[in-house]
Image (tube, rainbow, N blue to C red):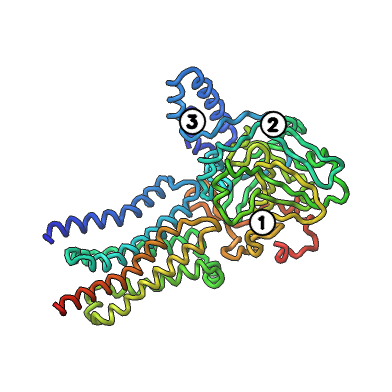
Amino acid sequence: MKRSTLITLKTLAWIACLSVAARLAWGMVTNNLGPDPSAAIAFATGKTTIWLLAITLAITPLRRLSPRLNWLIKFRRLFGLFAFFYATLHMLTYVALYSGFSLAAMESDIARRRFITMGVAAYLLLVPLALTSTTWAIRKLGGKNWNRLHKLVYAAAICGVIHYWWQVKTGVITPLTITLVLAVLFLARPVTAWLQRRKARAAVAA
Amino acid sequence: MLIGKPPDIPSSEITSREEYFRYLSRRRFLKGAAATGAAALAASRFIAPRTVQAGTKLQTVPSPLTTTGEQLTSFDDITHYNNFYEFGVDKGDPAKNADALPTRPWTVKVEGKVAKPLTFDIEDLLKLHPLEDRVYRHRCVEAWSMVIPWVGYSLSEFIKQCNPLPSAKYVQFLSYYNSKIEKWGYEDPGIYWPYSEGLRMDEAMNPLTLFTFGLYGETLPNQDGAPVRVVLPWKYGYKSAKSIVTVRFIDKQPPTTWNDQAPSEYGFYSNVNPNVDHPRWSQKTERRIGLPFYAQRRTTLMFNGYTDQVASLYNGMDLKKNF
């Protein structure tokens, strides 16, 4: 890929990732977030987090489909860090707008409300991944260890989806789409890996 | 706020009653104009794109039972942020779908432990007692709240006309349900329709319990439970059954929809109580709808602030057990 194309694509990715936050910020300033702005902020930041996680998880299976898609890896860290950025905003929404910065309220929530417990777990799983996202950290840990550590992203995504299902009320099935997308992405890994092995064997046999 | 320029007030900015009536008169004018020509219709659509179906102005009198010192939630939010599962589970669904509800002709059947089963026509119910303006706080179990200027009279006035027998210990309310019309509710496999709610007789007779026909001075919009509902300001919102077609007097506690759904989460009494949390979230605080994000959070009051009027109903009861 040409350097200029890469720069253009990265700029577009930044704009796309920031657009949700920009829209929210604008809505907050103009008080234009609908009847329940706290809920609108919580929903938008949470939804963006889980979808950005899905995008980062889609990159490896897509690359396995064709070597021509290898360049996608250059975007994984960007999307992953933006997922963490929105997860942090989501967390701050809870801390500021839902618990009103009350430590007592947060303590009792985290201990007793399973959807909050699950959300906090998902967030805590993302923290070490964000901290070790620098090139320096990858080098320091070594590729193998780094890969092993970053398998935590699966656990974070699963916790995130459970958090979503436990949060919505009976009869609401909005989390279904992201659940199916993540399920396909999870299944895609063994399937594409198997296809790759078969191709490799075929190549050896030939 | 655009107080200085009444003709330009969008419905979302309406908060006070005076402003509301100014808005109403303008809207009525636009409606009249609309009848005279398509151009005027287009104009009214352009100016007021989110008005709900025609409301009729109701003749009302003031009430000593009204709540004071609260900023009213806007008409727009009261009519576009609803829980009315028969018309969909999203807050915006009822405003989109409830047009299908046929509110005329409408009758309310009275049955069970009464001297004689009766049927009331909605027009007669509207005339049964003077309609009062009553502002009430409205607290949803989902931890959001509003302040709504309802129109109606105490349910006790209606119950007196029903001649319940001494054996009537509870009142059950059944909401309108037709799976051909309310197909959104039909798709939900978890709920047994019609929606059912109930009260103990003394709760039903409490003067705060409002037999409700309107809000903001005009007939109820469909998504708010037209043409007649009950409103129980000291209980979580789902106790306030909408679009009532049957009132049944019975000798034992009736089944109620949300209690049937999840008995550990929704009790029969469902009094607003900051000391008893919902298993999945805290009830200590609430979000006031329509306020900016930094001003929404507020402390939830015992009995939603109506302790003086209703606490005596529950003397000697363990409200943690009877939540």
The quarter of the displayed image where residue A84 is located: bottom left
Mark 2 residue type: Thr
Q: Given the image, what chain letter belongs to the residue carrying mark 3?
A: B
* Whole-percent x, y for residue B109 in the image: 75, 40
SS at badge 3: loop
Q: Which mark is residue B60?
A: 2
**What residue is at 58 percent from the left and 58 percent from the top?**
B285
- The residue singled out by tag 1 in the image is B272
- The residue singled out by tag 3 in the image is B4
Q: Earlier in the sequence, mark 2 or mark 1?
A: 2
Report the front residue among A131 and A5. A5
CA separation, marks 2 and 1? Answer: 28 Å
Mark 3 residue type: Gly
CA separation, marks 3 and 1? Answer: 38 Å
Left or right of A139 in this view: B255: right
* Whole-percent x, y for residue B160 in the image: 83, 40
